[in-house]
């Protein structure tokens, strides 16, 4: 279980002067600005849950993950992993967590992959039987057996990430922190990685916290999401609720004759927003308030639609909308 | 044309700023190190047959001390360079390819960064350190060769020689860096480079101490121009003609080595593109 | 026992890495050889111009030089990773992986690299000592041999301790490589007899950066019987204990200050 309580992290960043005179000034005195990367967040993650930790770049996702792993110390507030504060008892916690930072490998670069696993076996004191079992399991779900004898530097990005994931799971951690595990992967590899995470969670009941920019990851894996913006939690709860908060939004994308445009089109109801994208018209509305049938009729009759596509709002759109709203509110305040 | 290298120049300058603590610490401890070397030379001159007034291989004790102090300052200001390691890192992480497709030359990037380093080091540390060293040594009579106003001409030549030394250093570091393409790791090459430069540039010991045959060979190599020659120009141990000859030699070597580096790099890259990163 | 086993597993890993770069290893070996040759040549060139160095003859100075290589070589075998920590790894934010593992960070740093080049230095040092000793006319006592062995072994512990303490500063200042370089360079001054230095430098080289304590004094003891070898051995071992425990303490303090980069 992970308990995060009023967690805050403030970074002091030196302000650099401009030009040569500024540089010389910074040589003798340094001014700092305070950046509140994480600003008083609290949440609890019970065992066996898969949580998606999302937000824009610089929202404080990685900072939180790093504090949960114990390699950053909170400015205030606390984190308890099964009752232990990771930044105080780093080594004790390390035995029970697995970490992957998508941008950096933890494997030894120059040696065959299998040698890295042999070292990790000793580091985490894994018994021979457990090691065999885990290697068999990971070899299968992550499909790494094929390139075990290759040096890590010769692996492709997708292979390396699968290897990194395997390395983070080899000691059967109770909690797995994955910072952008699918970054830069192609669709097939992403699929494989998601499947592995899912399988691991199912078989071993591993708690997983993952950050990602790929909303498909979230939809496929996470029962719960925590949405972070400027260091604060905007939303914490099941995925479904987040969608519902926006009502039953549907979009109709219409192929229309060239003389039909969004500005000149007849208006059906103010609740139906019309916009134009790539020469197509996009209608956006809440299907709980406006009948779908009515809008479809309107599209064919008034807008002379030739073809049409109906879609539910995606989680990506939801997040985008929330962040945009937040941005707008912020702008108003300023 | 040169504008696109400005960010690297700036990065080199800022990098140097960022570690000012280290640099200041380094400067402080270098003083201890120089002091130790002075004691070694003191023992050498005391043990010599002529005693403290002896001239060994053209250096009096006082000139030798001035030489030690000035080569140390010179090395500190001029040889601040991570080129070899950065190339090695690029090779190891496979990021060299990123630069091949950018509209800047790989070589130009490093030259600009090193020049940025040199510029900051010279302005921040070079000017005060040279001034302090020259004034102190001069007042103590350790620089008997100095005459005015001829000194100012030598100072000008020294700055040019210093720039040449920095460029030579960067080119050689670059060549050794590119050699990493063939050996795939930089440890050995870096220590080989450091050893060769410190021995053959006269930093370890003035080249005048070398046996005649070896001295004649080393005289025509690029290394003397990286430490001994600029310092002897500044100390006015070389006359104008000799100074100009040294600078011309360094300039020639820069051209030759740059050409060599260019050929070597294109060969190395071909090797990489054929065999894959 | 667990750590002994773990250490050998990691060292094996390190050796496999090295074998991936055979050319580099060969160049490194050659360059160490060449580097020592250059330094020896420098001493030789200087001694050509003067009869003796403060009364020490060429074979005596050569013996000094050869002996100074032994503790340096031993340290070199085991603790080379500290250079990387001091120069690059903390600065590049490359230490996180060590902090995510259930093993002490300092142990991991030591287990990261084993440098076989050290053997080359060791062999060269022993060879030089042997050659020079054959040209010396001293009476070799059991005590002198003991103090030389203690000086080499425990001297290595002291050098490693200095490196640990200074590399640890990188956790606070991001980069401590230049400082490490300079402290390490002081070992060069213990290559010559202490007699050439004035009093305060001798004090520095015996009590502060004790290269003189474990290099110069044991050699002087062999050549001239200047010290009681057994007492000197004891002093060297004591100093090694103090330096070792202090440096581990400093490392622990600094390690606690380590923070990963933000973002």
Image (cartoon, rainbow, N blue to C red):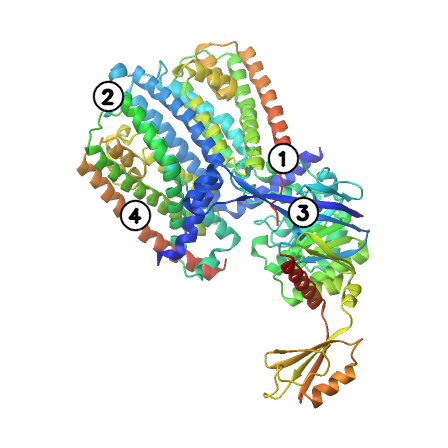
Q: Can residue B72 be seen in this view?
A: yes
The residue carrying mark 1 is C255
Q: Label 3: few (<14), some or many (≥20) within 10 Å?
A: many
Q: At x 33% / y 25%, what residue is drawn?
A: C44
Compared with A224, C119 (above or below) is above
Chain of the residue where label 4 is placed in the rendered structure: B
Which chain contains the residue that carries disc 2?
B
Estimate the x, y position of residue A173 in percent, counting from the top left: 75, 48
Q: Nearer the viewer, residue A207 or A27?
A: A27
Between B29 and B135, the one nearer to me in the picture: B135
Secondary structure category for the residue under label 2: strand
Give the numbered dot on residue B254.
4
The Cα atoms of the two marked residues, 4 and 1, are separated by 44 Å
| Residue under the point 63% across and 35% down | C255
**Secondary structure beneath label 1:** helix
Chain hosting mark 1? C
Residue at which label 3 appears: A66
């Amino acid at each position: 279980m992970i308990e995060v309580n009023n967690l805050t992290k403030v970074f002091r960043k030196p302000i650099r002067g401009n030009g040569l005179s500024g540089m010389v000034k910074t040589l003798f005195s340094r001014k700092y600005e305070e950046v509140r990367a994480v600003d008083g967040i609290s949440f609890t993650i019970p065992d066996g849950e898969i949580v998606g930790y999302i937000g824009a770049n610089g929202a404080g996702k990685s900072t939180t993950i790093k504090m949960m792993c114990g390699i950053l110390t909170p400015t205030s507030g606390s984190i308890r992993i099964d009752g232990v504060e990771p930044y105080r008892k780093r080594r004790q916690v390390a035995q029970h967590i697995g970490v992957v930072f998508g941008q950096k490998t933890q494997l030894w670069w120059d040696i065959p992959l299998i040698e890295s696993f042999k070292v990790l076996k000793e580091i985490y004191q894994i018994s021979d039987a457990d090691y065999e079992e885990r290697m068999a399991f990971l070899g299968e779900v992550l499909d790494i057996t094929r390139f075990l004898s290759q040096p890590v530097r010769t692996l492709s990005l997708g292979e390396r990430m699968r290897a990194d994931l395997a390395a983070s799971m080899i000691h059967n951690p109770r909690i797995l922190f994955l910072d952008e595990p699918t970054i830069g992967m192609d669709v097939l590899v992403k699929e494989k990685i998601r499947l592995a995470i899912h399988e691991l969670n199912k078989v071993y009941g591993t708690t997983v916290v993952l950050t990602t920019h790929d909303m498909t990851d979230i939809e496929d894996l996470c029962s719960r999401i925590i949405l972070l913006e400027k260091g604060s939690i905007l939303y914490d709860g099941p995925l479904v609720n987040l969608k519902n908060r926006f009502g039953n939004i549907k979009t109709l994308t219409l192929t229309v004759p060239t003389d039909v445009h969004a500005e000149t089109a007849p208006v059906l109801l103010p609740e139906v927003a019309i916009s134009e994208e790539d020469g197509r018209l996009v209608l956006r509305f809440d299907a709980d308030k406006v009948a779908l049938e009515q809008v479809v009729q309107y599209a064919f009759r008034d807008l002379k639609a030739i073809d049409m596509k109906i879609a539910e709002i995606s989680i990506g759109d939801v997040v985008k909308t929330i962040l945009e709203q937040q941005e707008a509110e912020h702008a108003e305040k300023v | 044309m040169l504008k696109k290298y400005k960010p690297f120049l700036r990065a080199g300058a800022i990098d140097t700023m960022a570690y000012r603590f280290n640099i200041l610490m380094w400067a402080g401890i270098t003083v201890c190190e120089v002091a130790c070397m002075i004691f070694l030379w003191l023992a050498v001159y005391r043990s010599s047959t002529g005693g403290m007034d002896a001239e060994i291989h053209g250096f009096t004790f006082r000139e030798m001390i001035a030489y030690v102090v000035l080569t140390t300052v010179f090395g500190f200001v001029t040889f601040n360079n991570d080129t070899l390691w950065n190339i090695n890192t690029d090779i190891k992480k496979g990021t060299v390819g990123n630069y091949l497709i950018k509209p800047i030359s790989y070589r130009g990037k490093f030259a600009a960064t090193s020049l940025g380093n040199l510029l900051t080091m010279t302005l921040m540390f070079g000017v005060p350190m040279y001034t302090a060293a020259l004034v102190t040594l001069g007042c103590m009579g350790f620089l008997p060769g100095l005459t005015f106003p001829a000194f100012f001409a030598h100072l000008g030549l020294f700055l040019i020689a210093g720039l040449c030394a920095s460029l030579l250093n960067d080119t050689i570091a670059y060549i050794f860096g590119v050699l990493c393409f063939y050996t795939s790791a930089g440890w050995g090459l870096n220590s080989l480079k450091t050893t060769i430069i410190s021995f053959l540039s006269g930093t370890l010991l003035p080249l005048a101490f070398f046996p005649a045959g070896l001295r004649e060979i080393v005289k025509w190599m690029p290394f003397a121009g990286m430490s001994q020659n600029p310092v002897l120009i500044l100390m006015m141990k070389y006359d104008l003609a000799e100074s100009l000859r040294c600078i011309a030699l360094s300039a020639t070597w820069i051209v030759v080595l740059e050409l060599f580096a260019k050929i070597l790099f294109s060969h190395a890259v071909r090797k990489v593109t054929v065999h894959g990163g | 026992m667990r750590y002994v086993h773990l250490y050998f597993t990691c060292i094996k890993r390190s050796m496999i890495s090295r074998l991936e770069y055979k050319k580099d290893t060969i160049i490194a070996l050659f360059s160490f050889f060449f580097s020592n040759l250059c330094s020896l040549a420098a001493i030789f060139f200087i001694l050509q111009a003067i009869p003796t160095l403060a009364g020490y003859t060429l074979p005596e100075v050569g013996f000094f030089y050869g002996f100074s290589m032994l503790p340096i070589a031993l340290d070199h075998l085991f603790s080379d990773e500290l250079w990387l920590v001091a120069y690059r790894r903390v600065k590049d934010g490359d230490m996180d992986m060590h902090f995510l593992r259930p093993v002490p960070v300092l142990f991991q740093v030591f287990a990261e690299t084993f440098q076989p080049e050290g053997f080359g230095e060791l062999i060269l040092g022993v060879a030089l000592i042997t050659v020079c000793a054959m040209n010396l006319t001293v009476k070799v006592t059991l005590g002198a041999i003991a103090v030389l062995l203690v000086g080499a072994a425990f001297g290595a512990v002291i050098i490693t301790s200095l490196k640990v303490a200074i590399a640890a500063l990188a956790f606070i200042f991001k980069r401590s490589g230049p400082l490490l370089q300079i402290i390490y360079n002081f070992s060069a001054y213990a290559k010559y007899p202490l007699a050439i230095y004035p009093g305060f430098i001798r004090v520095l080289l015996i009590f502060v950066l004790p290269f003189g304590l474990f290099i110069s004094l044991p050699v002087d003891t062999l050549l001239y019987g200047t010290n009681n070898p057994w007492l000197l051995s004891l002093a060297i071992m004591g100093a090694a204990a103090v330096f070792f425990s202090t440096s581990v303490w400093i490392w622990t303090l600094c390690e606690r200050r380590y923070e990963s980069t933000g973002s």
